[in-house]
Image: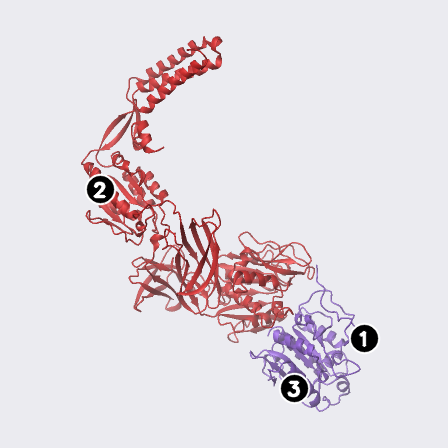
Chain colours: A red, B purple
Amino acid sequence: MPESLFTALFKYRPIVFENGTFAFEGGPWPAMVFAGLAGAVVLGAMYRRQRDRVGTRMVWTLTGIRVAVLALLLFALLRPALVISRVIPGENFLAVIIDDSRSMQLADEGIQSRGQNAYDAFSPSGEAVEQLGERFTVRHYRFSDVAARMDPGLAPSFQGRSTNIGAALDYVRRDLTGVPLAGMVLVSDGADNADTTVTEPLLQLKSRGIPVYTVGFGEEAFRKDIEVTRIEAPNRVLAGSAFAVDVMIDQRGFDGQTVTLVAEEDGIIAGSRSITFGRGQPGTTARMILVAEAPGTHDYRFSIAPAEDEQVSANNAQSVLLSIEDSRERVLYFEGEPRFEVKFMRQAMTDDPNVHLVVLQRTAENKYLRLGVEDSLELASGFPSTREELFAYRGLILGSVEASYFTHNQLQIIEEFVSQRGGGLMFLGGRASFAEGGYAGTPLENVLPVVLEEPTSSGDFLAEVDILPTASGASHSALQLEASPDASRERWAELPPLTTPNPLYRVKPGASLLLTGRPAEGGDDLVILATQPFGRGRSVALTVQDSWLWQMHADIPLEDLTHERFWRQVSRWLVSSVPDQVSVETPKTQFSPGEPVAIQAEVSDSSYLGINGAEVIATITDPTGAETTVPLEWSVEEDGEYRGTFVPDQLGGYDIRVSAAYGGSDIGTSHTGIRSVDLPTEFFGAERNTGLLRRIAEETGGRFYTRSTLGGIVQDVEFTDSGRTVTETFELWDMPIALLLLLTLLAAEWGVRRRRGLV
Amino acid sequence: MALQPPMAIPAQNRLVDPSVVTELQVHDTMHREFYFTRAIYSDLRARFPSWSVDFPKADRQFLIGLKRLTNIDASGAEHPVRLDDPDLRRFPYLYAVEVGYMSLTPAEREGLRSYLLAGGFLVVDDFWGSWEWFNFQRQIQSVLPEYPVVDIPLDHEVLHVFYDIEEIVQVPNVGQGRAGGPTWEKDGYIPALRGIMNEDGRLLVAIVWNSDLGDAWEWAEDPYYPLRFSNFAYQLGVNLIVYAMSH
């Protein structure tokens, strides 16, 4: 109901009813209620005598109307009233806090910007402030990321880089401590983008009974806008890897339209794709597959060209920093018997600069062939039996090797290789793999992303399968066989079938099925490639035994690189997010100058157990090449977790290199990068956040207003418990709605009687 | 649901000696990782095909030894395949004998080239002397003209992947071996292990010249055939297969 109509009917503004306490000011109300009840009984008895003449239904109707009239009169005689606190004029302070951030520059409510509209309404010379000034001493503030007192004669510039409403409320509360503060008027679009919530500042205000009256400017939903809301990308990838970036896009007013998403690497176009927005779907996620080429830290920008009639174009692009590593990661492939998979996998990865395949192949009982080892000692006694030895690798591939080959300790450290070290573990199909290899009931069964079925006897099961990517697989970066997803999907459909001796049909809850196999002889689809996160690492099951046919099949041209591409990408994926002994990260990669950067490092020993007493130093190199050091302190919350902070004060790239030492020995180093840029943060999520503004008002006992309803604020701020107040009583018996109701009832009775011919 | 193992020689294969086909009694009903695949190729001989020398007994006896000495999941059955058969590429190990009389057709040349460049591994055995060498060299160079034939040194991995082989022994044919006669034939006095490698150093072709591994496998059970020749033949045969499955 519009507030003006409410006030016309109920005599007072809604805030009086919201904040006031209901009471009866009339005589002894129990006696009057008793008299009213008696009157109702008498009325009922009188009408009952007329039952034969007019009928039972009419008697009840007329009795009901009369009783209602009687009740209304009785209500008025009881003199209902609202008791409410009201400020003493001239003895209280009122804070007017204007949002000075860039989002207030948006002109989405007409010709003028949000900020100008807000300033017009709440400038010191404005009508509202003049009226408020008659009752309060008004203090003016402006805020963006921080708040400050505002020179009444100086209009805000609306140049703040971010909005922190909680900090502003806290600042004003502290600034006006000790004076009778009747309330605060917060003038904002509510587009808060601070890392902290308003919960704590609101609790402080609530506990002190200080109401906040919020006035929202700007449109609650833009009519025409496209916004790149978020980018999900890995922080680091190995050079030569394909990697997936998910770009989250919101749109208003572009249903059914097609736009082009462009990816740029350091300003050079690295890829693009078309996106058609669904009808009635404001949010879309677009995946782009890019290839990491030159090592180093690179800026990836994802943008959509602004449409002509778009209201906000500054939110059409976002950037992330990506570190492309040039390291050579070691992957151990243990094969229980001579298999051609070994030959062709080595062939595929032989000159790979970033993945080094070490092969341990059991060629006879207790006889091993070691390939790609660093020296004569590596794997000299067979498969590793200590954490240190196994954890030196980042990836582990287990071929056709039965579980009984391993000791229980070896099975346990393989499990820990994934769960604690964070390594990537891949199981290959084979006659001694999965259930056929006796892995059910071992520590590795939990690690597997597939559900083991009853084992078949050797040779009982062999399925030739056509392999197809699932929806997840088709968009997975490791499974892109061609430059574009569509071409890749076509390539998968052309590949010759492979075989699996392992009947696996189900993946575990939480696992992802990426490739399925359709048996040539019919039957249920088989799991071919599945993965699941396990502890800090990842497990992968590739259930075929002859991927080498993608190299050797007669249908595969000699120049075809499908097999090479598959194994290079899958092996990179296997080791892509495997941590080092020292790792470092920041919560995001782009910061505004002056915004604190939280550095978090994890430090562990060679068996990947967290070390707490290490000396951990972050060396920060700023854009000019100058270095500063920041000691990182153990967080206490987690073993091996260290934290520190620095503040970038210049625009440009910052390199963060963390080194750790323990007991005088170096443990290792790790690095990451951030960029200090003038971010258009204010134009993301810039629609009016009515929910937040309403919450602030409701939780503190204030009210929320819009540009069209803010006229009532001048009256409403008077009714508060905060500051110096007096208690006033507002009588309700003469509310227009009571008279209206009485007349309506009487008219209704007359109408009923006339219809039945009783008058 | 088991697949039929690929093993049958096409009945219409004009190169197969009918007397040999009747010998094909050993069948493996299971799909295996490894098939001892014997190359069927065209040759200069009019009466019997060179490819089938020692076939199938040598193959079978060698496979018995291979399965006992290693844990390779090998089919126990002989497995001849034509060089122009598109299925050849499904079997990355290939054995050919008596290649001194080889005379490849264009289709066979193309099939063998495609096989080797894709990743296949060819072992040739049992050819002797200068004339047979020159003939084989001419044939193999027509298949892989871009790669030269080189001597395989004794420290090459192929001689150490399973057994450590320190010298190349001349393995005589069964007749000369049983009789204790000379181990050479024709003018092939010096045994040699040669090979063709690609630019990555991967051995595509292993050439056992002036030696007869096939006879040593075929007659390994013969008490009159010297054990040291059979031992060497098995050792080199196993090494070549383990190499083929890992390099």
A534 in relation to B112, above or below: above
What residue sits right under mark 1 in the picture? B18
Label 3, residues with CA under 10 Å away: few <14, some 14-19, many ≥20: some
Nearer the observer, A371 or B102: B102
Picture coordinates of residue B93 (x, y %)? 66, 74
- Badge 3 and badge 2 in a common chain: no
User: Alpha carbon of mark 3 to alpha carbon of mark 2: how far?
Assistant: 105 Å
User: Alpha carbon of mark 1 to alpha carbon of mark 2: how far?
Assistant: 112 Å
Q: Amino acid at mark 2?
A: Gly
Picture coordinates of residue B241 (x, y %)? 65, 75
Count of labels in the image: 3
Mark in the foreground, 3 or 2? 2
Mark in the foreground, 1 or 2? 2
What residue sits right under mark 3 in the picture? B192
**Quarter of image, res A601:** bottom left
Q: Mark 2: which secondary structure?
A: loop
* Residue A564 marker: none
Labelled pair 1, 3 in contact (Cβ < 8 Å): no
Q: Residue furthest left?
A: A90
Using residue A557 as the reference point, say whether residue A79 is left or right of it. Answer: left
Label 1, residues with CA under 10 Å away: few <14, some 14-19, many ≥20: few
Question: Can see residue A421?
Answer: no
What residue sits right under mark 2 in the picture? A126
Check the picture and name the quadrant holding the C terminus of chain B.
Answer: bottom right
User: Alpha carbon of mark 1 to alpha carbon of mark 3: how far?
Assistant: 34 Å
Using residue A437 as the reference point, say whether residue A721 is left or right of it. Answer: left
- Chain name for mark 2: A
Labelled pair 3, 2 in contact (Cβ < 8 Å): no
Q: Amino acid at mark 1?
A: Pro
Using residue A54 as the reference point, say whether residue A642 is left or right of it. Answer: left
Nearer the observer, A514 or B144: B144
Q: Amino acid at mark 3?
A: Ala
